[in-house]
Image (cartoon, grey):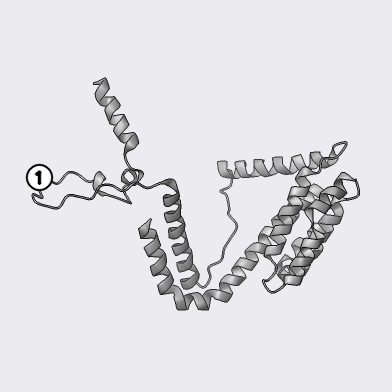
Amino acid sequence: MSNTNNDEKKEEQHRPLGAVLGWLNLSPTLPNTQDNMAGATAASPPRFIDYNQLMEANRNAQNLQLAHEIVFNKDFQLQLPEYEKGSIAEKVHDTMHTVFWDVLREDLAADPPRYEHIIKLIGEAKEDLKTLVLPHQTTLKAQIDDAIDLDTIKRRFEAKAADPHEYTKYFIDMMASLCAECRDENIAKLRTTDDPSECFRGIMEVLSLMKLDMANFNIRQYRPLLQQQAVAYEKSTFDKFMEN
């Protein structure tokens, strides 16, 4: 009996993932119908599928759903993820964020200060800021690259010749020139935040909102074009989904 159980476990471990899930190849999950279908062609062997193929299929399905919403729902907008009040996901999210910003605050208050985290954060804010610059604004992108050169910033911090406030001010000024009018209040609040860690936290949050504004603007701009190509796009994406 023990040997039989071991054999079953081994068989289960080697069963193709697609067969276990059922949705990629249903034949292994269906009852044996050979007795009722004499002479029928034998089913194809189950396909082996790896994790990357599953993820690709999932992405194709999500893209298909997203494109459908954009084309046929004129009120569709991207939104930041929201967590259910009091849920574990909300608690984990809030705890991780609080710890991150507390560490940054402790680093800046240390004697001597530790600048590794804030330099990385400045780099992330720079990349987020550049995503808000239009493709043809190459001069502005070059100006941002020159102003936020991480090697130079690192040397300045190490030489105690830099102040976090000068970088928070730079980002706030640039964001003010790029943001939609609906974000003016957020920018004004950032200007009154003195603590550099809190200010950078606000900067990253507002940059996320501005990226969302840009994405929704692009959706509105490209919706007519997407509507023209909707059928062809959905067909090609569905074909990719089925291939995986």
Q: Is residue 76 visible?
A: yes
Location of residue 112 (image quadrant): top right
Residue, disc 1: 35
Helix, strand or loop at label 1? It is loop
**Is residue 41 shown above or below 140?**
above
The answer to whether residue 87 of the structure is visible from this angle is no
Q: Quadrant of residue 219?
A: bottom right
Compared across the picture, whether 96 is left or right of 141 comes to left
Image quadrant in which you'd find residue 131: bottom right
Residue 141 x %, y %: 74, 67
Q: Quadrant of the N terminus?
A: top left
- Residue sticking out furthest to the top: 2
| Front-most of residues 106 and 89 | 106
Q: Amino acid at mark 1?
A: Asp
Report the front residue among 119 and 194: 119
Tell me if mark 1 has few (under 14), some (14-19) or many (20+) residues whose alpha carbon lies within 10 angstroms of its own: few
Which residue is nearer to you in this view: 170 or 239?
A: 239
Identify the residue at horizontal 37%, vertical 64% (top origin): 239
- Residue at image position (79%, 58%) is 148
Q: Quick check: 167 left or right of 240?
A: right
